Image (cartoon, rainbow, N blue to C red):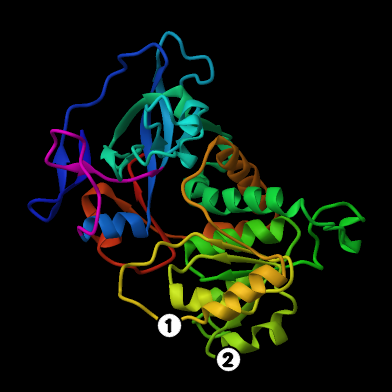
Amino acid sequence: MKAVAVFPRERAVRLIDIPEPRITQAGEVKLRTLDVGVCGTDREICGFHYGTPPQGSDHLIIGHECLGEVVEVGAGVTRFKKGDLAVLTVRRPCGVAECPSCAEGRQDFCYTGRFTERGIKQQHGYMTEYVVDSQEYMIPVPRELREVAVLVEPLTIAEKALIEVWQIQQRLPWSCPQAGGTRKPGHCHHALVLGAGPIGLLGAMAFANAGFSTFVYSREDEKSEKAELVRSFGATYVSSMVTPVDKLVERVGTIDVVYEATGASKLSFEVLKQVGPNAAFVFTGVPGLKGTSEIDTDTIMRNMVLKNQVLLGTVNAGHDAFEAAIRDLGDFLTKWPAAIKSLITAQYPAVEFKQPLLSVEGIKNVIRFG
């Protein structure tokens, strides 16, 4: 079968032929790969910035945003049958007995750092025609989401952020008239999303769907296609060309939550100075090591202490975030069908893998196998 693989020592990316995987354990499921999303992580691996092949292998099969169809199940599988759609999680447990997170199936909070990740770190990924994995790492997807289900894994980033923000912000009396007086956020709470790439746009949809008055802050003009897309699902687009960071509060109002999706550390810390009392700031981007930059640490620390602010980072996701992403995708498809479908910019056959992997055109590009 065909697979897209990176050869770090050769600094090459190739379409290769490998043996088709077989079920060897009772709890395993075999999937026919339908769609694999391409993201910034894949491009960075193809740029040889990181990505670690499995032990003893000279290559790493990439791809971690996968939608597949079940073609075979092991004798012990209870959650899937032939014909079901499924998405797969990415991170696998470290296997260290002393790691309580991995022992409880929450390897997204691994303490040791010895976890592996499919398509990224020491395990082959999903950019191949067939995949075999344990049913515990698969989540069923309703057939009606077939067209957009490849977006589940990138959406889990925002879903995990929302789960964590809500858990942390239960410290507050978050009652809001628009939320019926319940301890939930409503349109009187403002969420600011930094960046209008796929992670930012999916995050903006998730925050809007959760009831926040949502703003997206990015570089494109306020008459751009992305700006129109943001407005189509009820959020507000704010261009950095029109509104500098120190004027954000005048445009947005009190900033209660920031969802960072740019990987731009300088911008992020400038925005951090603008957030309001009791605010939560969520980092999701991983900036490259481009050298030092000056930040106003005194103001940031003073604000965090005197305004009860929270700063947190989040990466990878557990089953709860995957399940939330599937539920939300169903909501998006009902509320904003054109918007969510438009995030998938182009689909490529595997033989044309270089175009989506070596360029950054479009929003979310997909390699289609099925």
Front-lying residue, 96 or 104: 96
User: Can see residue 343?
Assistant: no
The image position of residue 245, as x and y in percent, is 58, 85
The question of residue 149 being in magenta is answered with no
Quadrant in which the N terminus is drawn = top left
- Asked if the stretch drawn in magenta spans residue 53, the answer is yes
Q: Secondary structure at mark 2?
A: loop
Q: Nearer the viewer, mark 2 or mark 1?
A: 1
- From the viewer's perspective, is 303 left or right of 50? right
**Residue at x-position 70% and y-position 51%:** 166
* Image spot of residue 191 (x, y percent): 68, 67
Residue 112 drawn at (x, y percent): 38, 38
Among numbered discs 2 and 1, the one appearing first in the sequence: 2
Residue 13 drawn at (x, y percent): 16, 52
- The residue indicated by pointer 1 is 294
- Picture residue at 82% right of the left edge, 58% below the top: 174
Residue depicted at 31% across the width and 54% down the height: 42
Question: Which amino acid lies under the numbered mark 1 shown in the image of this protein?
Answer: Glu
Query: Is label 2 in contact with label 1 (beta carbons under 8 Å)?
Result: no
Q: CA distance from mark 2 to mark 1?
A: 24 Å
Tell me where residue 165 sits by quadrant: bottom right
Q: Main secondary structure of the magenta part?
A: loop
Determine whether 141 is above or below 349 in the image.
Answer: above
Around disc 1, counting alpha carbons within 10 Å, would you say few (fewer than 14), some (14 to 19), or many (20 or more)? Answer: few
Read off the residue under disc 2.
242
Q: Which residues are magenta?
A: 48-65
